[in-house]
Amino acid sequence: MQVNGNAMQSIWYDGSVDAVQIIDQTLLPHELKIVALLSLEDACHAISHMQVRGAPLIGVTAAYGVYLAMRNNAEPLSEVLAQLLATRPTAVNLRWALERCRNTLDALPIEQRSPAALRLAQEIEQEDVAICAAIGEHGAGVLRTLWQEKQGSQDRLNVLTHCNAGALATVDWGTALSVIYKAAGDVPLHVWVDETRPRNQGASLTCWELAQHGIDHTLIVDNAGGHLMQNQRVDVCVVGSDRTTANGDVCNKIGTYLKALAAQASDIPFYVALPVSSIDFELASGGDIPIEERSAREITHIQGVDDTGITRSVRLTGEQTTVCNPGFDVTPAKLVTGLITEAGVIAANAPAIASLKP
């Protein structure tokens, strides 16, 4: 991704200090801070406290967390994997990356585990960059086709997205935003950005990314999407996925399901961009996905920068307010127009998904 005109990843290994560097996403868009992960505990904290977030990036961070653990003590592999697995329950890439680590490291002699873990983490990192670039290329074809249909009657293609499925959710490029980045050279685009309460990843992260890339965008409250679709101001929805099941049900940030319903009612295509590693081939349907329940404070309080430039947290609700804060919801496959993967655009159904199984 572009940051102040320079290329940057969301995570990388710095061999000069033997540390894993990340962008602390909890501070964006007000402060760009690079944080060094030096231990397993640092990696777990980064994932659980959402300094890194997005299913692909969580998986890469977990792989690096295994390396950081093996560097200090290469023996208790099962304990390390269990500790990382417990950080976030919904995104399947976490389990996928840890299984790769187990398969690679379990049979190795103790003294070989640390360098092997580093090589594997770097391999997963670079795979993610290539995969997301391919997702973008396939998705850009979808947007180009839509633009060919629309350009006679309007001056731009309007895309609605939810949460942040950009480079900040991956190592680079992103999933849903990769589609936008790859199409931007050929298609005049405007992006409607859902704020994505309660953590406001759309407002804080997606708007920041799109501004860095010079892509026209407008921030809206989460509940405005249906109104815009109803009034023909959205041409296509493109979102990401934290876990997609064998039948095509899509688990993504809370609020995605409502956008899919509005899109169906307004006859607007609804696409999901995701790597194959975000598909859980073992789960039959979305009803089996564990939905993470987040802290009540995410809803009762909001953080921002005041007029003096100081970051503050303020309470929005009364102290006795009861809160329910599911982090994700499930969009049934029947509401999904297509899945945009590194292997191409496929239908959201069991036969198509089975064809991608490794």
Image (spheres, rainbow, N blue to C red):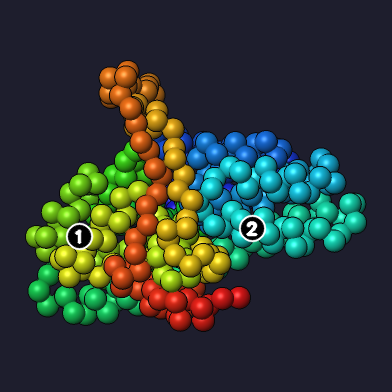
Q: Residues within 10 Å of mark 1 (few under 14, many from 20)?
A: some
* Residue 252 higher or lower than 356, as above or below: above
Q: Quadrant of residue 303?
A: top left
Q: Position of residue 53 (x, y in %)?
A: 49, 47
Q: Amino acid at mark 1?
A: Ala
The residue wearing badge 1 is: 262
Near-viewer residue (32 or 105): 105
Q: Amino acid at mark 2?
A: Ala
Q: Residues within 10 Å of mark 2 (few under 14, many from 20)?
A: many
- Residue drawn at x 32%, y 55% as measured from the top left: 256
* Residue 290 higher or lower than 73, as above or below: below
- Look at the image and tell me whether residue 131 can be seen: no
Near-viewer residue (193 or 331): 331
Near-viewer residue (321 or 221): 321
Q: Position of residue 167 (x, y in %)?
A: 46, 55
Near-viewer residue (66 or 142): 66
Q: Position of residue 144 (x, y in %)?
A: 29, 76
SS at mark 1 in the image: helix
Q: Quadrant of residue 317?
A: top left
- Residue drawn at x 72%, y 58% as measured from the top left: 101
The residue wearing badge 2 is: 97
Q: Position of residue 245 (x, y in %)?
A: 47, 66
- Residue drawn at x 44%, y 77% as measured from the top left: 350
